[in-house]
Amino acid sequence: MNGTTLSFKNFVIAAICCILLPLFGYVYVSSFNMGIRIILVVHGLVLFFLFFALSLTDLKSTLVFTMILVIPMAIDFGLIRYPSPPGYPPFAESIVVNLQDLILAVLMIQWLGAASMKKTHGTPIVGHPIGTLFLIWIFYSLLVGWLKAENPTYAYFEVVALFQGFFVYFYLINNTNTVRDVRVIIYALFAAQALEALWLIFQYVTGLNYTLKGVFVVPVRDMVGFRSAGFAGRDVVSTQMISFLAPVVLAYYYRVAERMSRMIAVAVIVIFVMGMMCAQTRSTGLATIVGFIMILTLGGMRGWIAKKRLLKFVSIALLFLILITPLVYSRFQKGAGGWEEDRVPLMRTAEEMWFNNWLLGVGPSNYTSNLEKYLPVELRYSWKAPVHNEFLMQLAERGIIGALLYYWFSVIMCVKLWRTTRSPDKWISAVSAGILAGMLGSIAVRVFHWWHQMPNYTFFCVMLALAVAMETIEHRRLENSPSASSS
C-alpha cells in the first residue's frame, strides 16, 4: 500500500513538472520580445528565488543583503508620473516603487511575524535624536511644499521618496542588533559599489552608456570625452556613493582584514578608483582623497595603523597621483565652462533665491520652477540649470530652518561615529571611522554638486542607520562588560 501510494505521488509530481516546465520555458523565451525591463525583471526574479532557496536558514540576512545590493541600481516602477520639462529633473518626478521597497516590505512582514510570536515585545525605536530630527525634517519639507511651492506636485513626490528612505533607516536601526548584522550590511555595500564601479568600467570600454533600465544617457557635449554614467545614469551620483564607501574599505583593510581579505580589499579599492576615472568626476576624486587622509589620521591616532604601513600607503598613493597627473590636468582644462562662466552665476542665482525666501525657501524640488525670477537678466528665458552646491540648494529650497535641521542630524551622526571609533571591537571602530571619513569627504562633493538626490539619498539613510545601530551595539556591550556588572 505504501509503495503504491508513493508511486502515485511520484507520478503526480512528474506529471505536474511535465506540464509546468514547458510552460515556464515558453514564458521565459517570450520575455525576450518584451523589452529590456521585462528581461531584467525575469532574470532578476530567477536569481532572487535561487538566492532565496539557498539561504532559507538565514532569510533575514539574505533579504537585507539583497536590499542594500540593489539600492544603487535604481530599478523602479512608476505609479504616478508627472514629467518635468526638458533639462534638469527634480528630486523625483513620479511616485515609484523601487526594488528595495519590495524587499523591505517582505522584511517588514517577517519582522512583524517574528515579533507576534515572541512572549515579550520590544518597542520600535526611531533612533533619537537623529531619527526624531530626520522625521521633523521630512514633515517640515511637506509643510513648506504645501505653503510655498509653485509646483507642489514635485514637492509631494519628494516627500514620498523621503519617507521611503526613512522606512529603510527605521527597519535597519530596529533589526541591526549584532556586529554580524553590521557585517552583512557592509559586505552588501562593498558588493553593490564594486558592481557599480565595474559597470562604469564596462560603459567606458564599450562606449555603451546605457543604464540597467535600458535608458541611453546622452553624452555631455564638451571636450572631456566619454563619461560613464553608471547604474543611475548620472556620473556624479554613481561615483559619489563609491567615493563615500572607499574610506570604509580602506579602514576595513587596516583594522579588520586578514591576509586574503586584504587582497580582496585592495582589489575593491582599485576597482573603485578605476570606476571613478571612467566617470571623470573631479569632486568625487577629491572626496576620496579627503576620506583616505581621514582614515590614515584616525588609524594613527587610534593605534591600528603602524607607521611603516602608513608610509607604504602614502608612497604608493603619491606614485599613483603622479602617474595620473596628466589625466587630471586634462580633465580640468577641457571641462565645459569655468567658475566665472558657469558656477559663479549659478551660486549668485541661488543666493538671490534664498535671500528672498530666507526663512522657508521656495519648497522642495521647486528650485527650477523659480529659476527664471532670479537668473541674471541677460540669461533669463535661455539658460536653466540648478546651482552645483548642495548647501545653497538646501537654503534655497527649504530656507534656513530646513537647512539647519538637515545638517543638524548630519552633525550628530558624525559625533556618534567619532565616539564609536574608540570601540575595542574591530568592526565597529573600522566601520565608524570609514563612514565618518566618507561624511567629511562628501563635503567636497556637496560644494560642487547637489549631494541630496536619488539613489544617493537611500544610500545615506543606510549610513544614518549604521551610525545609530553601532552606537546601540556599543552601549549594550559596555553594559554587559564585566567592569560594568562589578560596579
Image: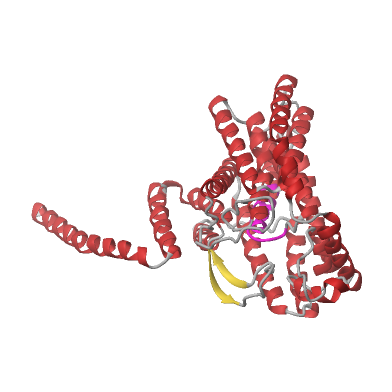
* Colour option used: secondary structure
User: Residue 367 appears at what percent x and percent y?
Assistant: 77, 71
Magenta: main secondary structure: helix
User: Residue 234 appears at what percent x and percent y?
Assistant: 63, 57
User: Residue 278 appears at what percent x and percent y?
Assistant: 61, 45
Is residue 478 at all visible to an observer of this figure? no
Q: Looking at the image, which is closer to me, 358 or 201?
A: 201
- Image point (13%, 58%), residue name: 11
Q: Quadrant of the N terminus?
A: bottom left
Q: Is residue 220 left or right of residue 260?
A: right
Q: Looking at the image, which is closer to me, 320 or 53?
A: 320
In which quadrant of the rendered view does residue 85 lie?
bottom right
In the image as oriented, which residue stretches furthest toward the front?
Answer: 223
Q: Is residue 464 magenta?
A: yes
- Image point (25%, 65%), residue name: 23
In the image as oriented, which residue stretches furthest toward the top?
Answer: 308
User: Residue 345 appears at what percent x and percent y?
Assistant: 85, 63
> What is the span of residues highlighted in magenta in the rendered image?
452-467
Q: Is residue 2 left or right of residue 271?
A: left
Q: Quadrant of the C terminus?
A: top right
Q: Looking at the image, which is closer to me, 439 or 451?
A: 451
Q: Is residue 347 magenta?
A: no
Q: Is residue 249 above or below residue 142?
A: above
Q: Is residue 103 left or right of residue 388?
A: left
